[in-house]
Amino acid sequence: MGDFEALVAVLDPDVELRTDFRSSAGGVRVVRGAEAVGSQALMYARLGLSMHRALVNGHVGLLSIRDSRPYAAGWCIVRVGKIVEMNIRADPDRLRRLDLARDGT
C-alpha cells in the first residue's frame, strides 16, 4: 500500500482539514473528504520540514520546524479509530498564540 492509500485508510470518509497555512487572507480554509484531505497532507509532507511530536493546546500533535524555527503545528481528532478532523496552524500570529510543548525527540 502506498503512502496515499495508507493515509486515506486512517481518515474518516467525511474528515475535515482546517488550515490557515500562512494565509494572506487571515482565514481558515476547510477541505472535506478523505481523498481531498489526504492529497493536502501529502503536499505538506513535500515541504521538507522537520517534524516533532508535541502537545498543541493540550492535543497530541506535531510541530514542524523550518530553518530552526517553528513553521506549523497540527493536531487531529480521532473517533472510533479514524481521523475525523485535522487542524494545521502556520500563520505566524496564530502559531505564536498556541500552547506548544515539544516532547524532546
Image: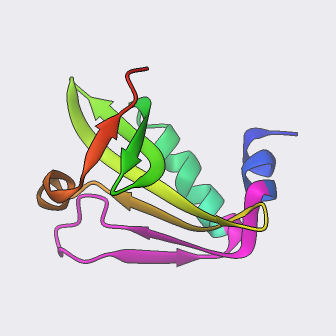
Of the 4 image quadrants, the one containing the N terminus is: top right
Q: Position of residue 2 (x, y in %)?
A: 81, 39
Q: Residue at x 61, y 57 (%)?
A: 39
Q: Position of residue 89 (x, y in %)?
A: 31, 58
Q: Position of residue 68 (x, y in %)?
A: 21, 23
Colouring: rainbow
In the displayed structure, 75 sits above or below 80; it is above
Q: Is residue 12 magenta?
A: yes
Residue 21 located left or right of residue 42: left
Q: Which residues are magenta?
A: 10-35
- How many numbered dots are placed on residues in this image? 0
- The image quarter containing residue 21 is bottom left
Q: Is residue 97 magenta?
A: no
As drawn, the residue found furthest toward the right would be: 1
- The image quarter containing residue 64 is top left
In the displayed structure, 103 sits above or below 40; it is above
Q: Residue at x 76, y 56 (%)?
A: 10
Q: Residue at x 26, y 41 (%)?
A: 71
As drawn, the residue found furthest toward the front would be: 58
Residue 69 located left or right of residue 86: left
Of the 4 image quadrants, the one containing the C terminus is: top left
